[in-house]
Each structure stands twice: as structure tokens, then as C-alpha cells.
Image: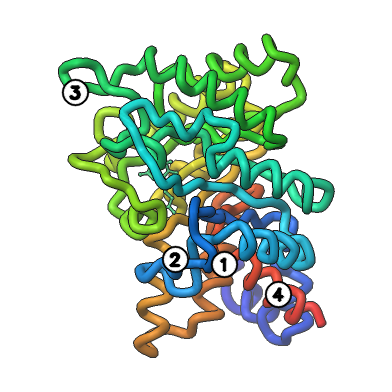
Amino acid sequence: MTFPAHRPRRLRATPAMRRLVAETRLHPAELILPMFVREGIDDPVPVSSMPGVVQHSLDSFRRALHEAAEAGIGGVMLFGVPEEKDAVGSGATDEFGILNVATRLAAAEVGDALVVQTDLCLDEFTDHGHCGVLDPEGRIDNDATLVRYREMGLAQAAAGSAMLGLSGMMDGQVAAVRDALDGAGFSDTAILGYAAKYASAFYGPFREAVGSSLQGDRKTYQQDPANRREGLHEAALDLDEGADAVMVKPAMSFLDVLADVAAMSDVPVWAYQVSGEYAMVEAAAANGWIDRERAIIESIIGIRRAGADAVLTYWAVEAAAMLKEGEA
Ligand code: PBG
């Protein structure tokens, strides 16, 4: 009973039929926009390796927040670009540091319409560019970093972040920040664990976006791209430690890990379509080598199909508009 009884093309014959049988749908509410806010600028500064993405001034940030809310996306993920950096990332815990200022502004302006999330990691704030603090020998000090993450979590929760995105890949970070939050009356603040985060070449343009001064690499804390099972182990630990949602990052080169995590997780699973994934499509499209809009939607739907409940993408607002047009 194969051909001619089975003709899969019947279900592809018309737009109406294809629409009816589509297995995966994209909705604006499943898209989260990462945003960069830079201290001490009056006008937004374009990120050259990410055409269309800027480091926001507080003014342009406010406007972009309202655009995002009107587009009906699910949330924003905020990154701060401070003027001054130091060894312990003091700007991260300063209530007047740029990320905390931006968070208060976002919570006040669009906190009812969007889930305001914040990146909880030290790399944007340290002069050495690492996600943690260093010991006297220059190695990452995991447990001393957890102390800073606890302080950073409290500063972000106090500023009104609804969900803390723990992206530093320190062991025990979810448990540590959960404990700090609960001890200070922030038991309603949610935690997104960047459970499976790989040491990826695709973060390249992000380093420009946050003015990172990283020397060396992050291979002692971010995962080896060769490892699939380890992604499951990391996700299981984050779930155990109380993560409210877990992330796989980057997205497109780790779809197998994403599918594995989606199969075992009992909380939402998100994926981060990172800066290099964005830059690749924009560069190819600028050369006329691919159809930009189709590539954007195909890449995001592929990440959803692999198991992501929501996707962080720099195209969130534009993709939401495309989806609305598609419906109209
Ligand atoms: C760490 C962080 C990074 C990204 C998000 N959070 C950089 C890194 O781990 O090196 C990268 C995001 C992107 O490339 O779009 N704070």
C-alpha cells in the first residue's frame, strides 16, 4: 500500500490546504526581542555587523519599547552597555547602572504589555570581558561569581525585571539566584536558565554590540559544540535548581539539543537565535543571494518546529509584522 494509494502532494496542492495542514504556527506572542541600551549617548548607534540593530539611547529605547508592544510580541530581553567597566562588573549591581535604569524605564512604560526580561551576566560590565570574576591566577572563580550574580539578581528584581536571564554558565547559578530572590521577598520574579549554552562562533557580532573587551574565550564555562548529551545534563540541573523556563543557545546549529530538551522539560523551552545567525541572513540577503523575508520566517519556524515554545530573535518586531500581513 504505497504509491498510488499514498500521494502526499494532495495536501500541498492549494494555499488553503497547506494552511490547514501546517504543523507549526508562529505567533507574535512567541517572539522575544533582545535590546541593547548604552549609557551616555543621545542618539542610537548602529551595530555595523548587525544591520538594522542599534545600541539604544534611553530615548530611542523608549520609542522602540512602544513599537515592540504595538507589534504584539511576547517580551524583551535587555542588555546594558555601560560607560565604565571594572574587574567585578560594578555597573551591574549599581541601581543607577544602565541596565537597571533601562529596566525601570521598560517596566514603567510597557511592563503590562511585555514581559521585561534582563540578561544576568557580568560580561558586559567587566573590563576583562568574562562572564564571571577572576581569581588571582586569572581563572574564573565560579563560587565568587555566584555571589555577584546574587547581588545582580536583587538589583534587577528591584528595578522591576519580571524574568532574569541567567546566561553566565556558572555551576549552581540558578539555585544561588533563586535563593537570593526568595530571601529578599522577590519570590515572584521568574528565572530563565540558559541551560544549554555553547561556546559559539555565532556570538561574534554581539561582542561588537556590547563593546566586549574579551581576551581569550569562554570554553571553561560555555559548552563544547560537540556535546549533545551534556545539553540535557545542564537542562536537568537548571530544572532541579528551580528554573521557570530553560534556554538553548545558539538555536540553528543546536536544533538536536533543543529537541532533546523540549522532550524532557516540564517548563517552557526557549531558544536564542543569536547575533551571528542574524548577521548571516542579513549579509546573504544584502548580496541578493537569498530571499530575506522567507529566510527569516523559515529560520524562526524551524526553531519552533524543533521544540522551542518561544524564540529570542533580533527580527522579533519585523517578523511579527510579517506574520500579521500573512494573516491579512
Ligand atoms: C552573555 C551573552 C552573550 C550573548 C547573550 N548573552 C555573549 C556570550 O556568551 O559570549 C550572545 C547573544 C548573541 O550573540 O546574540 N551575556
Dot 3 and dot 4 residues touching (CB under 8 Å): no
- Residue 233 left/right relative to 160: left
Q: Residue 323 or 139: which is nearer the viewer? A: 139
Would you place residue 148 above or below residue 129 in this image? above
* Image disc number at residue 315: 1
Q: Is 244 in front, or is 235? A: 244
Q: In the rendered image of this protein, does residue 98 appear above or below residue 64?
A: above
Mark found first going from the N terminus, 1 or 4: 1
* Earlier residue among tags 3 and 2: 3
Q: Is residue 13 left or right of residue 299?
A: right
Q: Secondary structure at mark 2?
A: helix
Please identify the quarter of the rendering in which residue 198 is found.
Answer: top left
- Label 2 residue near ligand 1, CB within 8 Å: yes
Q: Is residue 65 left or right of residue 122?
A: right
* Residue identifier under label 2: 278
Give the label, 3 or 4, closer to the camera.
Answer: 3
Identified by mark 4, the residue type is Ala
Say the numbered circle drawn on residue 301: none
What number is the disc on residue 321? Answer: 4
Question: Relative to 25, does residue 131 appear above or below in the rendering?
Answer: above
Q: Earlier in the sequence, mark 3 or mark 1?
A: 3
> Which of the labelled discs sits on residue 138, or is there none?
3
- Callout 1: CB less than 8 Å from ligand 1: no
Q: Earlier in the sequence, mark 2 or mark 4?
A: 2
Between residue 19 and residue 183, name the one nearer to us: 183
